[in-house]
Amino acid sequence: MTGVSQLWVYLQTTPLLGLAATLIAWEVAVFASRVARGHVLANPMLISIVLLSSLLLLTHTPYRAYFEGGQYVQFLLGPATVALAVPMYFNLGRIRRAAPAILPALVAGSLVAALSAMLIARGLGASRTVVLSLAPKSVTTPIAMGIAEQIGGSPSLAAVFVLLTGLTAVVIGPGILRFTRVRDWRARGLAAGTAGHGLATARILLLDETAGAFGGLAIGLNGIFTAILVPFLATLF
């Protein structure tokens, strides 16, 4: 036990801790998801978060010490998001044909995603900071943090809300689409990208390439529309 304790103390002082912990947690989460046969509640992202959070809490490891290594994995989020352009390229013809329907749908989705969250939070008595931090919850983390900071919200809170939104979309999104009888993969992809950004899009890409292409398009356009609409909505609160 003394040797294990000494090893842990050493790891806490090196970037190896965060990197190794993240990769191991992900492999365990993927294995658990396979055992559960892909059940929505066994989502690898959700399991990884629970495992890593539990590890940091039980070992009293500061998040800063973990992030020294975890940042290398986070860096790969950029290339991974850009890689969504590959299925978009192969489905460019379908995207062009659906363009007249895509633009109004995304504008409506961006507006509803931001405004509904703000109204619900205000109705429940949340502070203005929380309300403004919730507004960009359906866009990718870097955009959401930038928007929140500009309108007077909290970038840190915005990042948490983005993560929770993506996980919620991954867990309940497929059920809602089935319940509402949305069978067109193009519409499913747009819904995933607009409501659940990268997490939901990555999930639906595993099911259908066309859906992933439309989801990637929705991520980019939703970020633009949200950046335009949210500052105006913020003046109303």
Image (cartoon, rainbow, N blue to C red):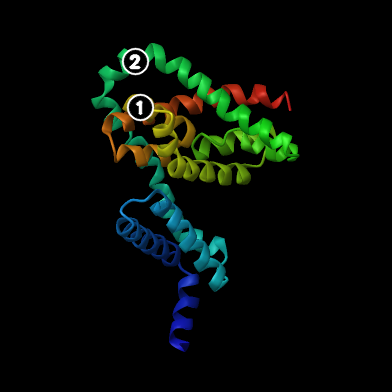
- For image coordinates 41% across by 60% down, the residue present is 22
Within 10 Å of disc 2 (Cα), the crowding (few <14, some 14-19, many 20+) is: few
* Residue at 56% from the left image edge and 68% from the top image edge: 57
**Image coords of residue 78 (percent x, y):** 40, 41
- Taking 51 as reference, is 77 above or below it? above
- Disc 2 target residue: 98
Residue at figure coordinates x 31%, y 15% from the top left: 96
Query: Which SS class for mark 1?
Result: helix
Q: Callout 1: 10 Å neighbours few (<14), some, many (20+)?
A: many
Q: Residue at the location (38% across, 47% down)? A: 76
Q: Specify the label residue 214 is tagged with.
A: 1
The quadrant holding residue 30 is bottom left
On the image, the x and y values in percent for residue 39 come to 36, 51
Q: Quadrant of residue 182?
A: top left
Comes first in the chain, label 2 or label 1: 2
Quadrant into which the C terminus falls: top right
